[in-house]
Image: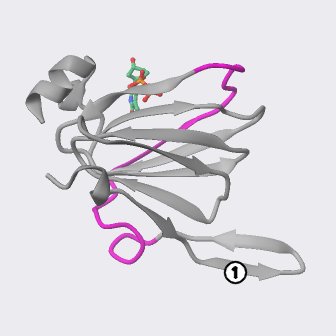
Amino acid sequence: MMGIEGCRLIHLPRISDTRGNLTFIEEGRHVPFEIQRVYYLYDIPANAERGGHGHKALHQLIVAMSGSFDVVLDDGRRRKTVQLARPDHGLYVCPMIWRELVNFTTGAVCMVLASSLYDESDYYRDYESFVAAG
Ligand code: TYD
């Protein structure tokens, strides 16, 4: 496993003109996995914390579509915080990373592209079990 060194910020294409900006994400070009699911978090109350889990095999790309928030990445040995604040930046999160999403601004929208369908058995919901498995 690559740990947090395997996570990285991906600069997505941005087409800008007087009408505004357009960003697109193509499988095989901009994300290093097959996209099987998209979900998004919105109407997030002040001080709410999301995430707080790890995945055994899931790859994800996390994008701040609006507003900003911090993603805390933890591989059981190291911890790193990445602020996401631009719709043309995506944070690639590889498997076996504990992540916490915090400090959402009002109206923030977090979109996540995921490499497989929702599967509760892919989750570590308990930090100690996650670290023990790593
Ligand atoms: P949860 O994992 O707590 O969300 P977060 O990653 O923000 O902490 O998921 C909240 C609920 O939504 C939980 O009951 C599982 C369900 N869920 C789905 O049904 N499908 C999905 O794709 C996701 C991400 C969650």
Left/right placement of residue 95 relative to residue 74 reads: left
Decide if residue 41 is on the left or right side of residue 10: right
Q: Position of residue 79 (x, y in %)?
A: 37, 40
Residue located 39% across and 41% down the image: 73
Give the position of the C terminus as an image quadrant.
top left
> Quarter of the picture for ligand 1?
top left
Horizontal relation, residue 118 to residue 47: left or right: left
Q: Is residue 27 magenta?
A: yes
Q: Amino acid at mark 1?
A: Ile
Which color scheme did the rendering employ for the protein?
one colour
Where is 69 relative to 47, above or below?
below
Most extreme residue toward the left, as rendered? 133
Q: Which residue is mark 1?
A: 15
Residue 107 image offset from top left, x and y in percent: 76, 35
The residue lying toward the viewer, choosing from 32 and 126, is 126
In this rendering, is residue 122 above or below 81? above
Image coordinates of residue 61 in percent, x first then y, are 42, 54
Quadrant of the rendered structure where residue 132 is?
Answer: top left
Q: Residue at x 19, y 55 (%)?
A: 2
Q: Is residue 83 above or below residue 32?
A: above
Q: Secondary structure at mark 1?
A: strand
Is the CB–ligand 1 distance for label 1 below 8 Å?
no
For the stretch drawn in magenta, the main secondary structure is: loop
The residue that appears at 66% across and 19% down in the rendered structure is 47
Query: Does residue 51 lie above or below 56 as drawn?
Result: above
Categorize mark 1 by other alpha carbons within 10 Å: few (<14), some (14-19), many (20+).
few
Task: Give, as a single range, the part of the protein colored magenta.
Answer: 26-48
The residue lying at 67 percent from left, 52 percent from top is: 85
**Residue 103 in picture, x, y percent from top left:** 64, 31
Residue 88 highlighted magenta (yes or no): no
Along the line of sight, the residue nearer the viewer: 44 or 4? 4
Instruction: Give the tally of numbered discs.
Output: 1
